[in-house]
């Protein structure tokens, strides 16, 4: 009798845990996924995004065609289902991680630059561009920082992965539905990583370091 009760309680607890984890991560507002898929260290970037970036950083920086070559749709569908049900996934190769990150970004209900500010971004430059970034919701600001600093690492290894600024820029423009000139500026100036002349400059996300 006692064993039966404990078994029922364990089953109930498992069901409750699954209910908590079953809130979608992809295809929902960024403000929502940043809360339901919250990072343990308080950084307002969904865990699933950081898992994708960390995996590519560790295993995919030198992989030819990273972010250009896609994993099979059936596998990405499976990963999306796991992400939405459990909030975490296990990748088998870098193209899977890159593919899931692209899918996450494509499925954001609102443009990452926000409908309110995107036209202003298209016309801004220099200090005004940085001011606009700080007008974004904190989740959007951090997600942009993580994506573009990560992409700078991809560009740094372009001699091996064949993903230089023009190639990666076209992809990001399509994925983020962002103006081409803004994507290029972000890629070049997200951080000091692509600064080859050693001169001090005012970078867009100089206050952010990607944490694992």
Image (cartoon, rainbow, N blue to C red):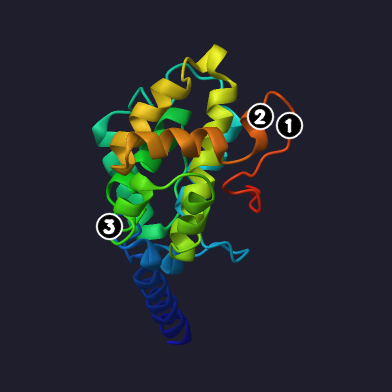
x and y percentages locating residue 181 in the rendered image: 38, 35
Residue placed under numbered mark 2 in the picture: 195
Task: Give the label on residue 110, or none.
Answer: 3
- Check if mark 2's residue and mark 3's residue have beta carbons within 8 Å: no
- Check if mark 2's residue and mark 1's residue have beta carbons within 8 Å: yes
In the image, residue 173 sits, relative to residue 2, either above or below, namely above
Asked which secondary structure carries label 2, the reply is: loop
In this view of the protein, which residue sits in the foreground, 20 or 124? 124
x and y percentages locating residue 105 in the rendered image: 35, 46
Cα separation between marks 2 and 3: 32 Å
In this view of the protein, which residue sits in the foreground, 193 or 41? 193
The reply, left or right, for residue 46 in relation to residue 198 is: left
Using the rendered image of the protein, determine whether residue 132 is visible from the camera's viewpoint: yes
The quadrant the N terminus occupies is bottom left
Task: Give the label on residue 53, or none.
Answer: none
Asked which secondary structure carries label 3, the reply is: loop
Q: Earlier in the sequence, mark 3 or mark 1?
A: 3
x and y percentages locating residue 136 in the rendered image: 43, 62
The reply, left or right, for residue 33 in relation to residue 60 is: left
- Check if mark 3's residue and mark 1's residue have beta carbons within 8 Å: no
Task: Give the label on residue 199, or none.
Answer: 1
Using the rendered image of the protein, determine whether residue 47 is visible from the camera's viewpoint: no
């Amino acid at each position: 009798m006692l064993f039966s009760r404990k078994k029922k309680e364990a089953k109930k607890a498992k069901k409750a845990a699954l209910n908590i984890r079953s809130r979608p991560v992809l295809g929902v507002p960024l403000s929502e996924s940043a809360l339901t898929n919250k990072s343990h260290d308080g950084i307002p970037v969904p865990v699933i995004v950081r898992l994708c970036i960390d995996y590519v950083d560790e295993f995919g920086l030198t992989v030819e065609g990273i972010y250009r070559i896609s994993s099979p749709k059936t596998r990405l569908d499976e990963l999306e289902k796991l992400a939405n049900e459990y909030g975490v996934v296990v990748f088998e190769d870098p193209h899977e991680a890159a593919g899931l990150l692209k899918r996450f970004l494509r499925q954001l209900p609102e443009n990452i630059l926000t409908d309110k500010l995107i036209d202003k971004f298209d016309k801004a430059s220099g200090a005004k561009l940085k001011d606009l970034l700080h007008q974004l919701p904190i989740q959007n600001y951090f997600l942009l920082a993580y994506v573009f600093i990560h992409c700078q690492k991809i560009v740094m290894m372009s001699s091996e992965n064949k993903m230089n600024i023009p190639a990666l820029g076209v992809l990001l423009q399509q994925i983020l539905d962002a103006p081409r000139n803004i994507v290029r500026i972000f890629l070049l100036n997200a951080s000091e990583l692509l600064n080859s002349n050693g001169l001090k400059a005012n970078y867009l996300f100089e206050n952010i370091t990607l944490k694992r």
